[in-house]
Structures are given as C-alpha cells and as structure tokens.
Image: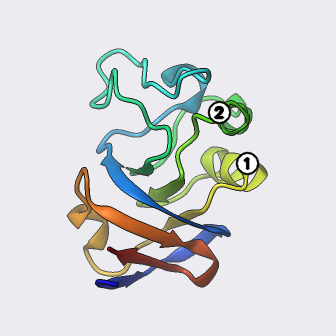
C-alpha cells in the first residue's frame, strides 16, 4: 500500500476504487438521477458524469433533507458511490451514508483533501479513520 491519510470517521466500512472529484457541493435530491447515478444538476462541474462505484470526493452536501433518502435509494439501485470523502461533512449526506452503509470520512489531515485527483485509486477505511492511497 501507498501513503495513508488520517481522517474522521462518519460512516464505518471499507471500500476502494477510483476517485471522482467535485469542487462543487452536491445535492443528492435533484442533483443526481437516483436510477442511474448520473449528475444532472445544470452547470455542476460533474454534470453528465456517473458517480456509481466511485470514491466520491466533494466539499459538502447541499439541498433538501430528502437527499439522505435519495442516497439510500441509489444504494438500493446499485448506483451509489462506493465511498464518500468530504472536506467537512454535514448532516444530510452523513445520515444518507449511515443508513445506506456507505463508508464516509471527512477532515483529512494536512492538505490531503485538495491533493485528491480524478482517477487516483484509494481505499477508504472509515472504520479505522484512514484513507490509503493505492
């Protein structure tokens, strides 16, 4: 394994995959198609991209509390992200990750959050509060 980054656990679990970075906040209710996992919010930096199976990196969530349930629906439909890394978690996304059993972390040590780039392979080990660069 490569470099390990300490972080704060929001939702336990472990997942690995390719990083998909959004520098824009994400709304799971209305911003993502819950049947396909494709970002549909007009003007969003990831508009048209699919988040299914990705390690989704974004600053924080936004929008309606229905976003928690939408994330759960995406998990049931098999189009949810494998894991979530936030700069700083907020309640809507945190609740959605917890009820969907999606590993989620935030508050990465140092400037590690800004160093994550599209296509990097990482393992999010939320249970042990670490992100491993593969």
Q: CA distance from mark 1 to mark 2?
A: 9 Å
Q: Could you tell whether 91 is left or right of 52 in the image?
A: right
- The residue at the point 32 percent across, 63 percent down is 121
Residue 86: x and y in percent read 45, 57
State the image quarter where residue 101 is shown. bottom right
Q: Residues within 10 Å of mark 1 (few under 14, many from 20)?
A: many
**The C terminus is located in which quarter?**
bottom left
Identify the disc placed on residue 100.
Answer: 1
Instruction: Name above or below for residue 83 compared with residue 11.
Output: above
Instruction: Name above or below for residue 62 compared with residue 58.
Output: above
Identify the disc placed on residue 79.
Answer: none
**The N terminus is located in which quarter?**
bottom left
Residue 68: x and y in percent read 70, 39
Q: Earlier in the sequence, mark 1 or mark 2?
A: 2
Instruction: Decide which of 129, 3 is in the foreground and name it.
Output: 3
- The residue at the point 68 percent across, 30 percent down is 77
SS at badge 1: helix
Residue 33: x and y in percent read 54, 20
Residue 51: x and y in percent read 44, 37
Instruction: Name above or below for residue 36 compared with residue 87.
Output: above
- The residue at the point 68 percent across, 39 percent down is 75
- The residue at the point 49 percent across, 45 percent down is 53
Q: Residues within 10 Å of mark 2 (few under 14, many from 20)?
A: many
Q: Do tag 1 and tag 2 residues touch (Cβ < 8 Å)?
A: yes
SS at badge 2: helix
User: For mark 2, what is the residue?
Assistant: 74
Instruction: Name above or below for residue 41 compared with residue 20.
Output: above
């Amino acid at each position: 394994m490569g470099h390990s980054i300490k972080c704060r656990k929001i939702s336990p679990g472990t997942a690995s995959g390719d990083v998909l970075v959004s520098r824009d906040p994400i709304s799971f209710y209305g911003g993502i198609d819950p049947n396909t996992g494709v970002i549909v919010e007009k003007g969003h930096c990831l508009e048209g991209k699919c988040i299914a199976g990705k390690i989704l990196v974004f600053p924080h969530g936004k929008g309606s509390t229905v976003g928690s349930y939408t994330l759960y629906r995406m998990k049931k439909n098999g189009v949810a992200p494998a894991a979530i890394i936030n700069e700083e978690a907020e309640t809507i996304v945190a609740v959605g990750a917890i009820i969907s059993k999606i590993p989620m972390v935030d508050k990465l040590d140092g400037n590690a959050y800004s160093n994550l780039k599209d296509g990097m392979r990482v393992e999010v080990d939320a249970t042990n509060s670490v992100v491993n660069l593969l």
